[in-house]
């Protein structure tokens, strides 16, 4: 441990409050993948944000210790797969319960023309080329220039992550009607 790792009591409290605050930031659950058939990597991520439609671009936040981070670095590409509620059983395996290729035994995974794996029945799969990267703290923010998109025709419900567990989105109109 270095001197910089030692936190004061106020810093510890700020960190604790930050974690609590982020548990209130509801997000769609995604699986970010990279690599090709010879070495696939994928992990669950909620740190995904649209950047711009001109050009179509998004940003993902990936911990530099995650295996997918190296695959993104090596190939300069990644895909973002938005999960539906029926994909909940993939979440813990893709966030540490299973490792490497074992993760891809769950769900139907195909190879895009760019070789990047994608989830066949994801609500949306976005295919990106890394255009920019910024290291901050433990993570790297990768800006992806989107060069292909697969939109599912099925009207599946998005899988949300809320306060450390799964949730689904109910349109407010439907709630008010019932
Ligand atoms: C709901 C949820 C959201 C997550 N979001 C992120 C994220 O946005 N970025 C990140 O680096 N890790 C995120 N993680 C943690 C990674 O999925 C987890 O650390 C993963 O095991 C790292 O991959 P590895 O085991 O291949 O190293 C999230 C985990 C969960 C359960």
Image (spheres, helix red, strand yellow):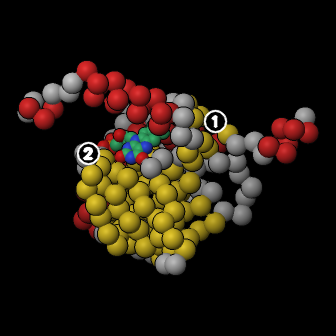
* Residue 94 picture quarter: top left
Residue 41 is labelled as: none
Residue 79 placement, left or right of 151 = left
For marks 1 and 2, give the one nearer the viewer: 2
Within 10 angstroms of label 2, few (less than 14), some, or many (20 or more) residues?
Answer: few
Residue behind mark 1: 167
Residue 123 placement, left or right of 16 = right
Q: Which residue lies furthest to the front in this view?
A: 10
Per the model, the C-alpha gap separating discs 1 and 2 is: 27 Å
Q: What residue is drawn where x is 57% and y is 41%? A: 26
Q: Are marks 1 and 2 in contact (CB under 8 Å)?
A: no
Q: Where is residue 38 in the image (x, y as percent from the top left)?
A: 31, 61
Residue 127 seen in the figure: no
Quadrant where the N terminus sits is: top left
Q: Ligand 1 appears in which quadrant?
A: top left
Q: Position of residue 10 (x, y in %)?
A: 29, 24
Q: What residue is drawn where x is 46% and y is 29%? A: 20
Residue behind mark 2: 138
Q: Element type at marker 1?
A: strand
Q: Where is residue 33 in the image (x, y as percent from the top left)?
A: 41, 57
């Amino acid at each position: 441990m270095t001197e910089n790792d030692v936190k004061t009591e106020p810093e510890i409290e700020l960190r604790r409050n930050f974690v609590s605050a982020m548990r209130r930031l509801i997000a769609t659950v995604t699986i970010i993948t990279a690599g090709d058939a010879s070495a696939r990597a994928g992990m669950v991520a909620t740190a995904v944000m649209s950047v711009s439609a001109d050009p179509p671009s998004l940003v993902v936040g990936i911990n530099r210790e995650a295996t997918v981070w190296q695959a993104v670095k090596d190939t300069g590409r990644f895909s973002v797969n938005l999960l539906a509620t029926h994909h909940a059983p993939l979440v813990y395996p893709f966030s540490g319960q299973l490792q490497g290729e074992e993760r891809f035994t769950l769900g139907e995974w195909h190879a895009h023309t760019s070789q990047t794996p994608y989830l066949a029945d994801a609500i949306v799969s976005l295919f990106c080329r890394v255009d920019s990267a910024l290291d901050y703290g433990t993570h790297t923010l990768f800006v992806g220039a989107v060069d292909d998109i697969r939109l599912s025709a099925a009207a599946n419900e998005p899988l949300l992550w809320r306060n450390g567990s799964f949730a689904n989105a109910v349109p407010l109109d439907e709630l008010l009607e019932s």
